[in-house]
Image: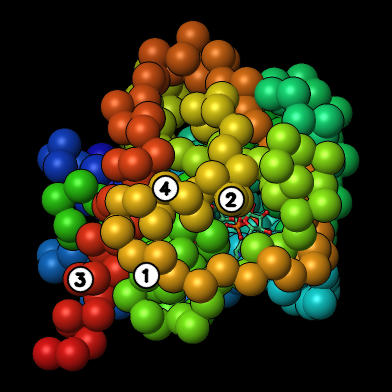
């Protein structure tokens, strides 16, 4: 069975492509390479370079490869950018997802896994949130994703498309075998930025706010290893292939870690005391967001294998070193 992976040249999508190959499946990637890399798509995996908003291209790809299921990662993903450019985010993440969903249904696709986000919940009190918590995103990014969840739910009722919306919490780390990682140099994610600070690629790390109502004043997030997340997608595919119904599932470990704690782990693991500056809050950031992640275990039988922040940080750092060596070569 061939699986179409939109955004498969990106960070998380490339890890799913590896996980699919590891279990003998046949992925096809559709990616416009806006933030992804052709080299991140393993040799032998077809890469269709183009936009998910291009209905003709999507229809052709579905027909050419006999696609019945799509894992949909393609999106713009930077929360503060979405505050500055909301319409760009609604176009790429919402409107183009609408085109993708419509074209998929017309082409006979009946299963879809969607990369949703913890950002759909908004500013929660800090207690772990389960999937029944009210959705009240505080950024255009979160809203652009929530609207896609709604479209999938409505299309499911009207057209029989079954889907699993996976609400990722903070994804970090890299493939344990060193085959992929987060590669965008201008990335804004905390663990990536901290790894770059270790290697001297950034002069310092800014902590965006230490005046939040949290245990040390910095924001709390629930960091999940990207390979555990890839496994959750495999489990979600298996669920739908087995005839299972649509689901919305949190993907996290249920453990909140503060920005300052992440920095402490990065310094300890690397042995490098990089400079840290306390800076103002960043727009669109909720104070604390931690998953209650029981449903994914009971519905999919998924459980994490790499629930260890030291290990996540170590793998992110190893990938950053790899990128640096590759650049120098
Ligand atoms: N990284 C996280 O912590 C995180 C957390 C929650 C949810 N997510 C979601 O996971 C998904 C993947 O994120 P990522 O971290 O791998 O980001 P990424 O930027 O590395 O990957 C996104 C990929 O989508 C491609 N793309 C974007 N718009 C496209 C379009 N219109 N047509 C075709 N390709 C397009 C990009 O080129 C890129 O390869 C996104 O949907 C994101 O919202 C990520
Ligand atoms: O240089 C930095 C980078 C980040 N942070 C802070 O670190 C925390 C985590 O930030 P980041 O790694 O950028 O992730 P989030 O903004 O939490 O967003 C990520 O996690 C969300 C789910 O929680 C996803 O929806 C988004 O796609 C993904 O970018 C936030 O409090 C940031 O303010 C800093 O203090 N300094």
The residue carrying pointer 2 sits among few (fewer than 14), some (14 to 19) or many (20 or more) residues within 10 Å by Cα, namely some
Residue located beneath label 1 in the image: 198
Marks 2 and 4 in Cβ contact (< 8 Å): no
Q: Quadrant of ligand 2?
A: bottom right
- How far separated are the C-alphas under marks 1 and 2? 15 Å
Q: Nearer the viewer, mark 2 or mark 3?
A: 2
**Which mark identifies residue 265?**
4
Q: Nearer the viewer, residue 166 or 109?
A: 166
> Tag 2 or tag 1, which sits nearer the N-term?
1
State the separation of the CA atoms marked 1 and 3.
Answer: 14 Å
Q: What's the residue at 80%, 63% (across, down)?
A: 281
Q: Horizontal placement of 235 versus 162: left or right?
A: left
Is disc 2 placed on a helix, strand or loop?
Answer: helix
Mark 3 lies on residue: 322
Q: Is residue 199 visible?
A: yes
Viewer-side residue, 308 vs 85: 308
Which mark, by number, is residue 208?
Answer: none
Counting from the top left corner in percent of width and height, residue 133 is at: 80, 24
Q: Which mark is residue 260?
A: 2
Instruction: Where is residue 165? Give x, y as percent.
Output: 59, 36
CA distance for labels 2 and 3: 25 Å
Separation (CA) of disc 1 from disc 4? 12 Å
Who comes first in sequence, dot 4 or dot 3? 4
Q: CA distance from mark 2 to mark 4?
A: 9 Å
Relative side of 287 to 313, left or right? right
């Amino acid at each position: 069975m061939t699986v179409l992976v939109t955004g498969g040249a990106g960070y998380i999508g490339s890890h799913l492509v590896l996980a699919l190959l590891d279990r003998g499946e046949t992925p096809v990637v559709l990616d416009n390479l806006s933030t992804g890399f052709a080299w991140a798509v393993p040799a032998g995996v077809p890469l269709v370079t183009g936009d998910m908003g291009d209905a003709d291209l999507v229809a052709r790809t579905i027909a050419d490869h006999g696609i019945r299921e799509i894992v949909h990662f393609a999106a713009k993903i930077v929360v503060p950018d979405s505050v500055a450019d909301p319409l760009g985010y609604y176009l790429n993440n919402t409107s183009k997802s609408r085109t993708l969903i419509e074209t998929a249904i017309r082409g006979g696709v009946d299963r879809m896994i969607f990369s949703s986000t913890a950002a759909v919940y908004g500013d929660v009190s800090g207690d772990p949130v389960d999937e029944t918590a009210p959705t009240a995103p505080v950024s255009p990014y979160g809203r652009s994703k929530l609207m896609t969840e709604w479209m999938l739910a409505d299309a499911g009722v009207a057209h029989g498309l079954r889907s699993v919306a996976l609400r990722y919490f903070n994804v970090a780390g890299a493939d344990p075998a060193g085959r992929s990682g987060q590669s965008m140099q201008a990335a804004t994610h905390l663990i990536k930025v901290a790894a770059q600070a270790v290697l001297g690629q950034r002069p310092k790390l800014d902590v965006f706010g230490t005046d939040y109502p949290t245990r040390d004043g910095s924001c709390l997030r629930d960091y999940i290893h990207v390979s555990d997340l890839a496994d959750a997608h495999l489990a979600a595919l298996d669920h739908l292939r087995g005839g299972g119904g649509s689901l919305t599932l949190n993907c996290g470990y249920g453990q909140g870690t503060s920005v300052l704690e992440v920095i402490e782990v990065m310094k300890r693991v690397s042995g490098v005391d990089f400079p840290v500056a306390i800076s103002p809050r960043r727009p669109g950031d909720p104070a604390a967001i931690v998953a209650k992640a029981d449903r994914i275990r009971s519905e999919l039988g998924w459980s994490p294998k790499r629930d260890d922040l030291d290990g996540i940080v170590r793998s992110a750092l190893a990938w950053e070193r790899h990128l640096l060596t590759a650049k120098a070569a």
